[in-house]
Amino acid sequence: MKTIGLFLLSIKEYLIFSLVIIISLILIFSNDNSQVRFFRAIAVGFIGTIQSGVSAVPNVFEIQKENQFLREKNIELSNKLSELKEAKLENIRLTKLLGLKNSNISGIIIASIVNKSLIQARNTITLNVGESDSIKINMPVITDDGLVGRIVSTSKNYSIAQILLNRNMNISVKVQRSRVDGILNYDGSENVTISNIAKSADVKAGDVILTSEYSNYFPAGIPVGIVTEEGNLDNLFKKVIVKPLVNFTSLEEVFVLKRLPENERVMLEEYYLQK
Amino acid sequence: MYFSEYLKFAIIFAVLIIIQVSFVWLISISSYNITPDLVIILVIYIGFTRGHIAGMLSGFFTGLTLDLLSGSFIGLSALSYSIAGFIAGYFYFQESSKSTVKRSMIGIMSLCTVVAYSIFFWIYYQGSTISFPEIFMKYVLTTTIYTLLFGTAFILFSNVIETQKK
């Protein structure tokens, strides 16, 4: 016992280091952004490969038990699904009856930027409005030039907004002229890029980029930027570079739109993804 | 370390974090917003002068604070700073006032910063079109060099203080 204690004491640095690394990784993986999704995909793929190999060996004692459980679960889920379908239809009928389009509040709040934080490409701005001004997380931030970003954190009197030049921002956009859709994200330089645009799509330098109807967070039609360069990324997709319309270095005042993601739409999309 | 020493470092960290978050962007260079990292200098210094445990724990907690203040990707700075503090602990030398060791601190600082930022930016730019050599040239090296300028000033300053104490 004493020997084990002495051994553990001799490697205490490595034990604490392992603990710190594990906590950091848990925190990293508890984020929900594109980088973490990439790692999760790799991890799931890796684990899946191992598990598929292991699962090839059947456990005869467990199969009967599992079959019984799955049958019961199947009946339970079928009942729940039909209940949900009924509830959805009822919701649609009631919404029509009440004449409600959505439950969002309209209006804008004028805010001044009290701090700009440019930490390793995680660009954010701090605004002098907060929960006491009805600011909520995910509200869009704009200027008269175009889209700035969205609120990610709030306190009583202040709020933090992620700007376009942030790796965690992914925005559904479209080209105003040709109506081509794509996903806008920040590649780390002073511009932003649009991904998922087919090589054959009609996009030219000078085209205006707007937010699209597919975006959960932003209303459609807000100007985002102008295409400065377009070229081929690979055999399938184009690389489109966009210069934001908003000049973030001289930005002083912004408007926060009192608009929140449409709950019904978000819930439906999440429900579909979970199915 | 004694309690008063913990308190002293906590206050210095708090001041550095405030400067890092609120004012350092004013001296950012290039279109990639490269800024020096004042906090990692102190993390490495603590690892170098106080050992593995002090280095990695100070790195973890300050990194976590920076993550919380940035509002995104919580845990990433905590991970990279902890590793920087831990590596610095390998060069722990109790008689750190020896000039040869002091001189090598710039090299140690470079090594720790390069490793920490390689991990940080490699994870941060996953899923983007930028390749690792590009990330290394654009972000890791530039941030390291810019940080080392301040690190060198910090070492010279700590040398002057130690000389005055003697």
Image (spheres, coloured by chain):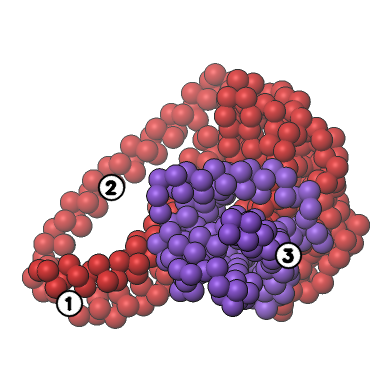
Chain colours: A red, B purple
Residue displayed at 46% across by 29% down: A91
Give the x, y percent position of residue A95.
53, 25
Q: Looking at the image, which residue is at 63% across and 61% down? A: B163
* Label 2 vs 1, first from the N-terminus: 1
Residue B118, position in %: x, y?
59, 71
> Going by the image, does B130 lie left or right of B83?
right
2 or 1: mark nearer the eye? 1
Q: Is residue A40 visible?
A: no
Kindly check if marks 1 and 3 are in contact, taking CB atoms under 8 A apart as contact: no
For this rendering, which residue is in front, B154 or A229? Answer: B154
Mark 2 nearby-residue class (10 Å; few <14, some 14–19, many ≥20) = few
* Chain where mark 1 sits: A
Q: Amino acid at mark 1?
A: Pro
Dot 1, how many residues are within 10 Å of its Cα: few (below 14), some (14-19), or many (20+)? few
Instruction: From the image, tell me which residue sits under label 1.
Output: A58
The chain letter under disc 3 is B
Label 1 to label 3: alpha-carbon separation: 62 Å
**Label drawn at residue B149:** 3
Q: Residue, x 40% and y 45% (percent of image)? A: B3
Pick the residue in front: B166 or A81.
Answer: B166
Q: Which is more toward the observer, A253 or B81? A: B81
Disc 2 versus disc 1: distance between alpha carbons? 26 Å
Residue tagged by mark 2? A77
Task: Say left or right for B33 vs A72.
Answer: right
Residue A114 seen anywhere in this rendered image of the structure: yes
Q: Amino acid at mark 2?
A: Leu
Are callouts 1 and 3 both on one chain? no
Badge 2 marks a residue whose secondary structure is helix
Asked if residue A6 is positioned above or below residue B3 in the image, the reply reads: below
Dot 3 falls on a residue whose secondary structure is helix
Q: Are marks 2 and 1 on the same chain?
A: yes
